[in-house]
Amino acid sequence: MSDTFVVVGGDAAGMSAASKAKREDPDLEVIVFEKGEWVSYAACGMPYYVKGEVDELEDLVAVTPERFREERDVDLRTGHEVVGIDPERETVAVEGDGERFEQGYDHLLVGVGASAIVPPFDGTDLDGVFTIHDMDEAGEIESYVTEQSPDRAAIVGGGYVGIEMAEALSARGADVALYEMLPHVLQPFGEPVAGVVEDHLREQGIDLHLDTAVSGFNGDGRVDRVVLEDGESDPADVVIVGVGVAPNVDLAEEAGIELGSTGAIATDEYGRTNYENVYAAGDCAEARHVVTGEPDHVPLALTANRAGRAIGQTVTGSPTPTGDIAGTAIVKAFDLGAARTGILDEERAREAGFDPVSVTITDESRPGYYPGSEEIKVTLVADRDSGRLLGGSVVGAEGAKRIDTVATALHAGTTATELQNTDLAYAPPFSPVWDPVLTAAKVLSGKLE
């Protein structure tokens, strides 16, 4: 009798694991329980659906449930919620199709993701107040904007979602105000990036409110005002709350699966929890940071897909590490790209035992004589004693994907001098002779001497 691999959660980590495990061992019974109806979807594309650049919500689905069942032979059961895990008996309790039943497993993956944080504001239940973290929410926002044609939109939170939704709703004709309680937007990207993005948002007509905390929303059934902590209020016909996400850990915690220091599920290098045959991956789980070597929680799509795929191999007899993370991320802010990787915060670097040194340079994305050159700003951080790179950021109208060079260097343990001497490609349509990343590394290397 073949083993049974049960997966809880049908998005990036879960479906990557299920697909890989079935490819590696066609005789393995693979069962996926997903409480919703959507699986394997591109959550990062939802703001662009609301904006109108993606025609249909279904276009964001990478693989349909039918293809998983018919082509990949995965027993995918949508509309089924796992409500309990018993690691000692190796069973899960499931509710679906109007019944409750138990399912045994030989291997279990918890890939239940994260949920949008909803602060304890007044008025979050008003019509027109949304978070955007799943497909149904994206559909509801698009329908509301289409039907109501709001004149004034309020975005609460200046992270990825806030920036992307400001662009989306502006494109839909709304006057957009963005409220951020911290001094800058895109806080993990550092001040050099934030300053450039903030100036550009204002140029695009976004009414930016920094150092401004929101306390709630007013309206008679439907939102019409955003209330600030100082007692002032501003008009709003639609509100997007995008203040971050929290890992979904209740199911695991109730089962005795240990949480880590970040509040997400603790895992080893193979994605295992404190139970040898129970794994966790994706937005609900920790991963090891490549710079510090310590657990971290950075919920991003590639992290989830990669970890799920590795676990799919491990459960079929080929132990495969899930891989370290650097927190590499990129966001589009109207005409700008902003990207970051590793550790940019110097206080965090010191807490990790480093003596951080940083530089920020402004350069051109191509030679000045070549058409289309744009200003680009690169920040690099390194450890004074070892010269090892700790992190970096890039912002500009083109070339933000240069962050991948820095991320690769972090995974290789590269020093600033080694990065400076890296043989990168050059041709005028693509970069100057000294790519801006190399120039930043050259300046940083000199500062470390």
Image (cartoon, rainbow, N blue to C red):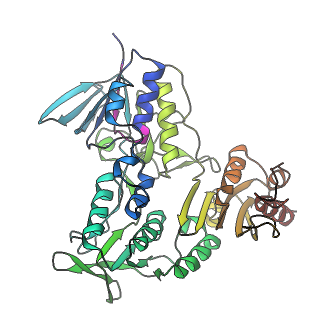
In the rendered image, residue 192, in percent from the top left (x then y), is placed at 65, 72
In the rendered image, residue 375, in percent from the top left (x then y), is placed at 71, 71
Quadrant occupied by the N terminus: top left
Quadrant occupied by the C terminus: bottom right
Residue projecting furthest to the left: 98
Vertical relation: 436 (above or below) 236: above
Residue at the image position 35 percent from the left and 68 percent from the top: 241
In the rendered image, residue 13, in percent from the top left (x then y), is placed at 43, 39
Residue at the image position 44 percent from the left and 63 percent from the top: 161
The foreground one among 113 and 149 is 149
Vertical relation: 395 (above or below) 95: below
In the image, is 144 to the left or to the right of 440?
left
The foreground one among 46 and 182 is 46
In the image, is 106 to the left or to the right of 44?
left
In the image, is 127 to the left or to the right of 406?
left
Q: Is residue 204 at least partly visible in the picture? A: yes
Question: Splitting the image into 4 quarters, where does residue 171 fall?
Answer: bottom left
Highlighted range, magenta: 4-13
Q: Is residue 11 magenta?
A: yes
In the rendered image, residue 299, in percent from the top left (x then y), is placed at 47, 51
The foreground one among 258 and 218 is 218
Q: Is residue 245 magenta?
A: no
